[in-house]
Amino acid sequence: MSERSNPIKMIDVSGKEIVHRQAEATGRINLKGDTIEKIRSGEIEKGDPLPAAEIACILAVKKTPDIIPLCHPIPVTSVDAEFHVADNHIEARCRVTADYKTGSRWRPSWGWPRPSSRSGTW
């Protein structure tokens, strides 16, 4: 047993009731105008990045317990990824729904795409 006053542990949710839960995260991906134009006109060499981002969002939601220590693996019932292309950015939104004893709050934050931990324009 740890001698620390506040040991790290995964919270026991066995006594909780199953509750319908929803969580949402949004983000903005700043892009250069010519990159936005290439996306709109279908000129990205590797193909349309938005369907790939949608798949990446869903995969990230499913893998959240592998990324965040002590995060419970929950049965996610739906993931909805939306992207709105503006003049100099893409607005990304990820909604997650689950019916379980603990929340889905971490999943959307991992589901929306981001270039890296740094900010900037692609």
Image (cartoon, helix red, strand yellow):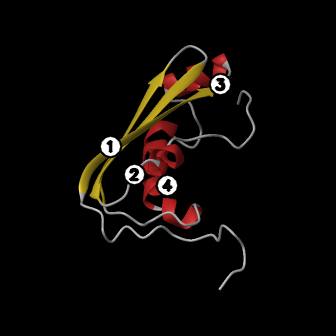
Q: What's the distance in space between the residues labelled 2 and 3, CA to CA?
A: 29 Å
Q: Which mark is residue 76?
A: none
Whichever of callouts 4 and 2 sits on the residue coming sooner in the sequence is 4
Specify the amino acid type for callout 2. Answer: Ser
Identity of the residue furthest to the top in this view: 87
Q: Check disc 4 and report the residue beneath it.
A: 60
Rendering quarter of residue 38? top right
Q: Check disc 2 and report the residue beneath it.
A: 104
Q: What's the distance in space between the residues labelled 1 and 3, CA to CA?
A: 29 Å
Query: Quick one: SS at disc 1?
Result: strand
Q: What's the distance in space between the residues labelled 3 and 4, CA to CA?
A: 22 Å
Whichever of callouts 1 and 4 sits on the residue coming sooner in the sequence is 1
Residue occupying image coordinates x 44% and y 47%: 105
Q: What's the distance in space between the residues labelled 4 and 2, CA to CA?
A: 13 Å
Residue occupying image coordinates x 52% and y 39%: 49
| Residue toward you, 116 or 105 | 105
Q: Which x, y percent locates residue 33? A: 64, 17
**Residue 52 in view here:** yes
Assess disc 2: are there few (<14), some (14-19) or many (≥20) residues with their C-alpha within 10 Å of its C-alpha: many
Specify the amino acid type for callout 1. Answer: Gln
Residue occupying image coordinates x 61% and y 40%: 114
Specify the amino acid type for callout 3. Answer: Leu
Specify the amino acid type for callout 4. Answer: Ala
Query: Quick one: SS at disc 2?
Result: loop
Q: Check disc 1 and report the residue beneath it.
A: 22
Q: Check disc 3 and report the residue beneath it.
A: 31
